[in-house]
Amino acid sequence: MYAIIDVSGRQEKVEKDVDFSVNRMDAKVGDTVKLPNVLFALKNHAYHIGKPYIKDASVECEVVSHGRDKKVLAFKYKSKKSYTRMVGHRQDITVLKVKEIHIP
């Protein structure tokens, strides 16, 4: 059983007892978060497809930790102008663990 959910504008494939990371959420470590935007689900060889979301479906997750993602480097360069610039960015993330997937 798995589900594809919409979290912070990104689509994530989630399964029970699997960790995944999303953009920083306002929740404390150990809290339970309910994510209602389920786009697709597979349960007992039956497909459930939303229009755009499945009605009354949700995914319960536990907040495992808060942290920062890997650094992404952006390099700017203009030829013949002696111009270079490197900028780094680290995104704040929250790690969630799926506890339950509720499909009606």
Image: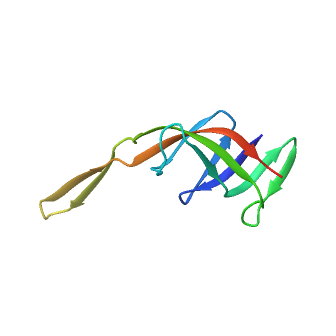
- In the rendered view of the protein, which quadrant contains the N terminus? top right
* Residue lying furthest left: 82
Q: Is residue 77 left or right of residue 17?
A: left
39 or 86: which is nearer to us?
39
**Residue shown at 22%/59% (left/top)?**
77
Please identify the quarter of the rendering in which residue 18 is found.
top right
Please identify the quarter of the rendering in which residue 36 is found.
bottom right
1 or 76: which is nearer to us?
1
* Residue lying furthest top: 17
Residue 60: where, in percent of width, then height?
A: 66, 45
Residue 40: where, in percent of width, then height?
A: 74, 54
Residue 7: where, in percent of width, then height?
A: 58, 55
In the rendered view, how is the structure colored?
rainbow
Q: Is residue 79 left or right of residue 4?
A: left
**Residue shown at 69%/36% (left/top)?**
16
Residue 33: where, in percent of width, then height?
A: 59, 47
Please, is residue 21 above or below residue 40 in the view? above
**Residue shown at 87%/41% (left/top)?**
44
The number of callouts visible is 0
Q: Is residue 56 left or right of residue 80?
A: right
**Residue shown at 80%/46% (left/top)?**
42
Please, is residue 30 above or below residue 42 in the view? above
